Image (spheres, rainbow, N blue to C red):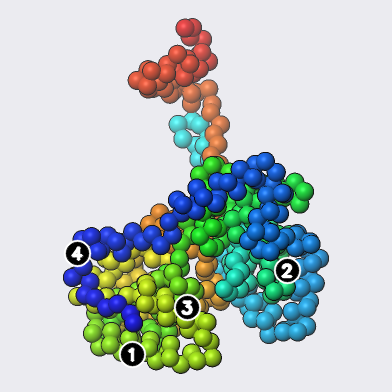
Amino acid sequence: MIEIQTLSSLSRQEYKNLLYRSSLNLDNVISGTIEPLAQAFRNHSYQALSDAAERFDGGLPQKPILTAEDLESAYNTVKSKSPEIIEAFEKAKENIQAFHEKQTPHGYQAVIADNTLGFRFQPFDRVALYVPGGKALYPSTVLMGVLPAKIAGVKDILLLSPPEKQTGRINDVVAAIAHMAGVTRLLQAGGAQSILAAAYGVEELSIEPVDFIYGPGNIFVAAAKTYAFSKNLCGIDSFAGPSEVLIIADESANPHYLAHDLLAQAEHDEDAIAIMLTTSQKTVDATVKAIEEAIASREDEEARKKIMRESIMRNGKIFLAKDLEEAVAFSNDYAPEHLEIQTTRNNELLSLITAAGSIFAGDFAPVAAGDYYTGTNHILPTGRAARYSSGVSVHTFYRRITWQTVTQEGLQAGADAIATMSRVENLFAEHGYSVLARFGEKQ
């Protein structure tokens, strides 16, 4: 069911293919779907949104925008019917908020060569968070996306989420958690059309173009975000590909835990990636057996069972490593979204990891703990983007602006150097002279 190989037996090309995973090829989607849709948004954004919603979601709801009052009503409904849901998300909110409040950055200034230089952090004006629907609900993503933005000081946070096909409106739990997080507006639209609505703005719905779009989504969401960024319409968090976990384990790891952690990743969808590296053949055999038993036991959840089986068969892999150092080296090359470490050397290996979206160390640190409750963020880079980007944090929502106050003495001290450097770059005529003119020199 799950592919098993020795890590050292991989050819150079096989190793590279593992690293440069490209389950989402956006080129055809962008040219075939996103570019024509974007042109429609440029012509008339509300009509484009309405037409796309009709095509993909069965139409825009009668009330496309839910207000703070609508969200509060949903909250009260959920609280009265299922108070345990509100209680669970409140506990998670406390942890997420506590962790992210410690991330607030501070600017500084310093006097360098008689001039005062500094930088400050300015929060974005408007952002849009995409929360998927479809195969699963993600109210936890509402907390993960909204709370850091609010802590950063973003005033306008637009939530984007598709209405349920059965009811034609957003799920009450998603709306309730949006109220809990402090959202004031929610656009009941999904897919590429909601991303482009946020990027271009929709005057009829009082949606101004946002500075930043973030959150997970399907291939159309990923393509629309990538397009919006490529056209300099707004910033985005990172390329959002299939969710992934890489587990490093040795002979001390519990195969029962390992199996369920791999399957928890596979549960997302058929494209999810679940990989384990271990130094123990015994751990391999026991984990494979536990995976098969776990899937077989899901008799009451045939749809989810089918997704897990397909995901494990398509993208699940177990590699036997010669030692933990080889496993760590592969992990750093792979730069996984989620990394679990279940060994006798957890703290040591933790310090050796140089690229990962989020790390979960120890037998009692499944990815699900961070997905929901512990306080770190679960909106993370996928597809090896953890080499150069990070998960959503309070830092995500700032512009870092540098500034300087230059004195006459400070500029005069650097005048000759500036003149020389501008001559080297053949820009003295105005660059260099804009400095020298201040000290009475004529061209």
State left or right for residue 385 relative to residue 372: left
Q: Amino acid at mark 3?
A: Ile
Q: Residue drawn at (43%, 84%), measured in percent from left and top?
A: 260
Mark sitting on residue 11:
4
Q: Residue drawn at (56%, 76%), measured in percent from left and top?
A: 373
Q: Residues within 10 Å of mark 4 (few under 14, many from 20)?
A: few
State left or right for residue 324 relative to residue 227: left
Give the spatial CA distance, label 4 vs label 3. 30 Å
Quarter of the figure with the N terminus? bottom left
Give the spatial CA distance, label 1 vs label 2. 42 Å
Mark nearer the viewer, 4 or 3:
3
Q: Secondary structure at mark 1?
A: helix
Mark sitting on residue 289:
1
Q: Residue drawn at (52%, 48%), measured in percent from left and top?
A: 227
Q: Circle 3 sits on which residue?
A: 307
Residue 141 position (above or below residue 420): below
Q: Residue drawn at (68%, 85%), measured in percent from left and top?
A: 84
Q: Amino acid at mark 4?
A: Ser
Q: Is residue 397 visible?
A: no
Q: Amino acid at mark 2?
A: Arg
* Marks 3,1: beta carbons within 8 A: no
